[in-house]
Amino acid sequence: MIDYLRLTPMGLIAGQNRYPCSIGRGGIRSNKIEGDGATPIGDHKIVGLYYRADRIAKPNHWATPIGPNDLWSDDANAPEYNKLVRTPYSFSHETLRRGDPMYDLILVTDWNYPNTVANKGSAIFVHQWRRPRYPTAGCIALSRKHLWDIATKICFGATLSISARNPALRK
């Protein structure tokens, strides 16, 4: 089982494996704010695992299927900021059940969750990349195969470590 992930300039280390990955277009930062595109420095816990049951098998016993009305609030003015919400929802949000495969499998971190601070940043996920090494809005992204490999072995509460000692990633 995987209980520790570490982001390095050479990829994401999970167990005995190193996987190529993408990070936020804003690099890694200790002072993350909503919309900056940065991946936040720190030790983050994996507190959720969501998957598209209509597209893939359940990856882990603690995984939760993504429903057709599932959204993630990214509106700092909303009381549900940085939390799972459902339609109808009038505040700004991300749709979890997307037409593309990017969110077919999502590991949710505890960055600014569950006790949120407005504008500190939302939805720091580990998800499938758009294409190899293409930057994200702040998440960590991997190939579908590598994400699946991690999701099938990861423990609830595993630590994702993003260090300031990675000068190649810092901006």
Image (tube, rainbow, N blue to C red):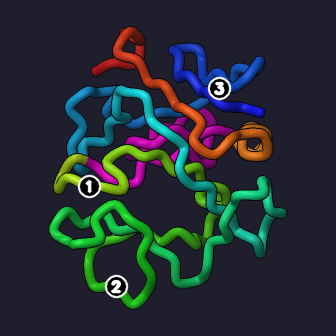
* Mark 1 or mark 2: whose residue is earlier in sequence: 2
User: What residue do we see at 29% from left, 55% from top?
Assistant: 115
User: What residue do we see at 78% from left, 57% from top?
Assistant: 61
105 over 163 or under it: above or below: below
Q: Residues within 10 Å of mark 1 (few under 14, many from 20)?
A: some
Q: Which mark is residue 116?
A: 1
Q: Which mark is residue 89?
A: 2
Residues shaded magenta: 121-144
**Which one is in front in this view, the residue at disc 3 or the one at disc 2?**
2
x and y percentages locating residue 79 in the rendered image: 22, 72
34 over 63 or under it: above or below: above
How far is the residue under mark 3 from the one under mark 2?
Answer: 35 Å
Residue at which label 3 appears: 20
**Which one is in front in this view, the residue at disc 1 or the one at disc 2?**
1
140 or 79: which is nearer to us?
A: 79
Residue 129, magenta (yes or no) = yes
